[in-house]
Image (spheres, rainbow, N blue to C red):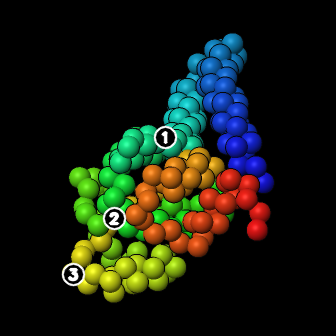
Amino acid sequence: MNIEKAIKKQKSKFRRFIVAIAMLIIVLPVILYFSKQTNTFFIVYLVIIELLIMLFVLLRINNESLSYEVDINKIRIDAGFPKKLISVACDKIELIHAEGNDKDMHVVLICKTKLRNKCVKPVDINFLKNYPYAGYYYGKLKKRNLEQEYFYTIIKTGGYKKYSLLNELYKGCTIAAFTEESIAKIKEYRNIVE
């Protein structure tokens, strides 16, 4: 599967979705106006439908938005809506793990230091239950340095854009360890067949 084509398809589907929803938001009040229904029930019903449509659009924007910048030794990730900024030095990232397939892939970053961010949490038992494969590699990290406290963040939004993010992390984070699954995702992005 060519991931670049999938990213382009994802962007075009999102644009079509936004255009269709914008048309729907405009057409519904126009239909109500031309039908000359001034009943309060129809007006309240229209307002509720418009609010639900807006909520759905915000959820879709949240699922689709992911942008990142890679500097010399720093990576900045903006994920979700409203934007959640994750800015971390590449040498602070210890482990990178990818779990899931296609658009539903989660990218897990385990860092040495706590970043000034709400998205970065200390590794706890819930993390180890939810991501047991990453927990296995975390156990190996912890054996090497018992006194070090580790923190994690999970990137869930962005769809196929997470593949290119993984590739950039692979290029930039030379010290970080990558799990077998994340290496497989990078190979899939680069179209390397074993």
- Between the C-alphas of marks 3 and 2, the distance is 14 Å
Which of the two labelled residues, at mark 1 and mark 2, occupies the earlier sequence position? 1
Q: Position of residue 86 (x, y in %)?
A: 35, 49
Quadrant in the picture for the C terminus? bottom right
Q: Amino acid at mark 3?
A: Glu
Residue 36: percent from the left, percent from the top?
66, 14
In the image, residue 59 above or below residue 104? above
Provide the secondary structure element on which disc 1 rests: strand
Q: Disc 3 and disc 1: Cα gap in Å?
A: 34 Å
Marker disc for residue 48: none
Q: Residue 83 or 68: which is nearer the viewer?
A: 68
Identify the residue shown where x is 55% and y is 26%: 43
| Dot 3: element | loop
Mark with earlier residue (3, 1): 1
- Identify the mark at residue 111; answer none if there is no mark: 2
Numbered circle sitting on residue 67: 1
User: Are the two marked residues, 3 and 1, in contact with CB atoms closer than 8 angstroms?
Assistant: no
Name which residue type carries label 1. Answer: Ser
Q: From what the image shows, is residue 60 above or below residue 90? A: above
Circle 3 residue: 147
> Residue 179 location in percent, x, y?
53, 72
